[in-house]
Image (tube, grey):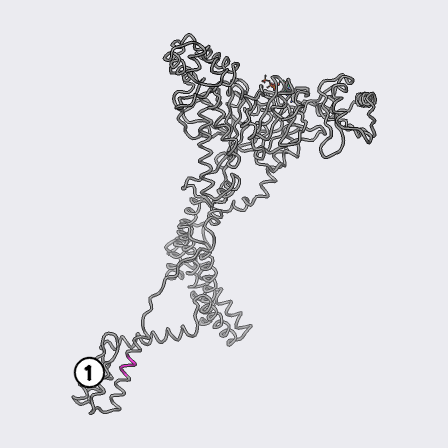
Amino acid sequence: MAKKKTSTSKKKKTPRKKISFALSKQQKILLGSFLFFVGLALIFSFVSYFFSWQTDQSIVGIIEERELQAENWLNKFGNNVAHFFVYDGFGIAAFIFAFLVTLTGIYYFFDYAKKQLLRFWFWGLLVMLWISVFFGFFAGTRNLFSGVMGYEINDFLQDYLGLIGAILLMTFLAIVYLVIRLKMTPEKVGDAIKKTKKDIVDDFNTDPASEENSENLAQQTDYEKQVIEEVVNIDDTGSIDLETIVDEDNLEEPFLKTVIQNEIKDSTDSEVAMEIEKVAEEETVEENISKKLVEDFGEFDPTLELSNYKFPTIDLLKDYTGGKGITINQEELEENKNRIVNTLNNYKIGISNIKATVGPTVTLYEIVPEAGIRISKIKNLEDDIALSLSALGIRIIAPIPGRGTIGIEVPNKKPRIVSMRSVIASPKFQNAEMELPLSLGKTISNETFVVDLAKMPHLLMAGATGQGKSVGLNAILTSLLYKKHPAEVKFVLVDPKKVELTLFNKIERHYLAKLPNTEEAIITDTNKVINTLNSLCIEMDERYDLLKDALCRNIKEYNTKFKNRKLNPNDGHRFLPYIVLVIDEFADLIMTAGKEVETPIARLAQLARAIGIHLIIATQRPSVNVITGIIKANFPARIAFRVTSKIDSRTILDSAGADQLIGRGDMLYTQGNDLTRLQCAFVDTPEVADIVDYIGSQKAYASAHMLPEYEGEEGGTNLDISVDERDQLFREAAEVLVIAQQGSASLLQRKLKLGYNRAGRIIDQLEAAGIVGPFEGSKARQVLVPTIDALNQLLENESNNL
Ligand SMILES: Nc1ncnc2c1ncn2[C@@H]1O[C@H](COP(=O)(O)OP(=O)(O)OP(=O)(O)O)[C@@H](O)[C@H]1O
């Protein structure tokens, strides 16, 4: 329930609500055509109303009497509507309204910018009112030109302002319109008048010599005519050959002057009237196109395809505590306190203060030793204190970082299960503003512990068998299922044990990602793991290219940009879901495929954080050949369940402690320096089954999320030399090379006393079996199997697979 609440309150915050008014393209086309035809209907009714209004007047307002017919082209409907708008309304100006409706239809149909349309409406309605009042001014009575509105408004104006006042107001309004809407200025008016005048004059003076001139010419002497002809000899550019004029002494001065002046004036006149080509102003967009896209279509919603998807409800999870909180056993606390104090006193360590914090599985006793006591002394007494408390799993933290006290963690006699339900329902998880929130469990002070996988950015989990690793993985996956929509996260599940993660098959088309052309989304086969890892590397490279193209630094920025429609899907951009790769039993994989798995994993771990691919790797055997340096270096976040030795604990956590855990989900978490002791949330298989059933029964995508195709190289672990054809000394040879970690034929020759050819053949067979790497020129081949154990495992697997 709490989940639902937060999701609705979240929605309220997002601006998407506003967008629900935005119309889709189809809706706009439909609305556009509807308005267009309504507008046309109005125009037809109005036009015919002017012819038929007198005849039809008697049936205005009548709708139900079917035998009555109106003469209006749209019959009674047209008559009524036109009567309303024209007669009762705005008279002839009502046509403006009809045109506006039609225009609106066109605007919606072609999806033009609506700002312009708003302007049309605003000014259109004002002009309609003005025209209607204008006609009302001239009409003495109610009439068809002004409509009742125009007549009444005019009447009111005259009563209120008087005749002159009304005229002044109307003229002023007309000027306002001309100045604002048509951008008229006195100069423009002057120019326009001049131009019209000139056009009219030009129309009359079609001959270059004007009538006036020709009249004058008639009165002139032949000589003068000749001069004028010469003078008028204006070349194409309009310049006049003045020399001709100056040479003529006989010329009658005043006459010449006027002629020249006239001609010059004419020629300059023609320059003034030069037609200036209108430069088309480029249209500017007032709003960024992506903003318009967002306005029109709303933000891109990746969840749209499964918009009805319902997140699993909290009641699918069980409450193992029976609704009770932590019960404090006062006696037990007192007893433990006394024992601690006594043990320390035996070693002459005085305590000035002691404080207990009761957690679900352990209680932390915080001790402040008396001044002068060396911390290392207490640390060394760990085993003695454990002995005196007769309890397993005592961990001493000396000192507790940041507190200046010494902590002694003592397991409770009755550990309490932390149900997944309680952590999922906690406000800390529900309100977590994280990309990939994981609610791992509860801390020693009984607080829900939520971390962001996206920040980790990869997680390494280890623990001996039966200590809660599988439950831990399920808790992680469940957290994500409760928080992330199928569009936002995809899982790639690798499960060599073939049993732990099979349940998740049911949500294949919702949450899983797989290689194209594969049937099962959950990967159990080593070869497929290699292909999938390489495919993820391709996906990673593709994502980096997309991010580079979009100038984004990480997937979050990229997806935000994509949601705001700033990235064009036609350029290959797409919403990028997070990809979480989960590998159970990593040791198994490393044993069988070695470098072929390690290399892509290391690459992904090093680079994939920014582009949203996160790795969770779990292993039972945290030995150094499984968790190699390169893997460890790239997995700062680690979870350790109980392990069997201090060495294993060091391998995972770089410090002891995991060997002192009590099992059953008791774990240590580190994301760098501090170790946090947690009780892992418990989610049982039937609960997971219910959750995946709940999700699986809902509408899904057509298929699982497809990863890029990767063509695996032939060879490698593919057995192209059949096992039967192997040399008798194959196994021995393999052992020799694995022990020496050197893949050379000459070593085999020496150790097994073989000829060159036979050693070479065996090397080929070893390569085919994936034990040694390919030929590398003068260097010895790489040995891909790290230990004899691994070799045994590999050969055993091989014979099982046959
Ligand atoms: N968080 C937990 N709270 C309570 N009990 C737990 C918790 N985690 C595990 N257990 C108990 O421990 C048992 C073994 O856990 P789980 O199957 O997770 O071990 P595992 O480490 O995955 O073992 P393996 O590696 O053999 O698969 C569970 O059946 C359950 O009874």
Q: Is residue 689 visible?
A: no
Furthest-left residue in view?
A: 222
Q: Quadrant of residue 447?
A: top right
Nearer to me, 521 or 698: 521
Q: Is residue 53 above or below residue 388?
A: below
- Residues 491 and 206: in front is 491
Q: Which residues are magenta?
A: 262-266
Please state the total of marks drawn on the protein image.
Answer: 1
In percent of the image, x 45 and y 67: which residue is there?
131
Left or right of 474, for residue 104: left
Residue type at mark 1? Glu
Q: Quadrant of ligand 1?
A: top right
Residue 263: in magenta span: yes
Q: What residue would you read off at disc 1? A: 230
Foreground: 101 or 380? 380
Relative to residue 262, is residue 758 depicted above or below? Answer: above
The picture places residue 201, in percent across and down from the top left corner, at 29, 77
Q: Tell me residue 198's x, y (percent).
A: 31, 76
> Residue 675 appears at what percent x and percent y?
66, 29
Name the spot of residue 682 as percent of width and height, x first: 64, 23
Residue 209: quadrant of the picture: bottom left
Q: Is mark 1 within 8 Å of ligand 1?
A: no
Asked if one can make out residue 475 in the rendered structure from this viewpoint, the answer is yes
Is 112 covered by the magenta stretch?
no
Image quadrant holding the C terminus, namely top left
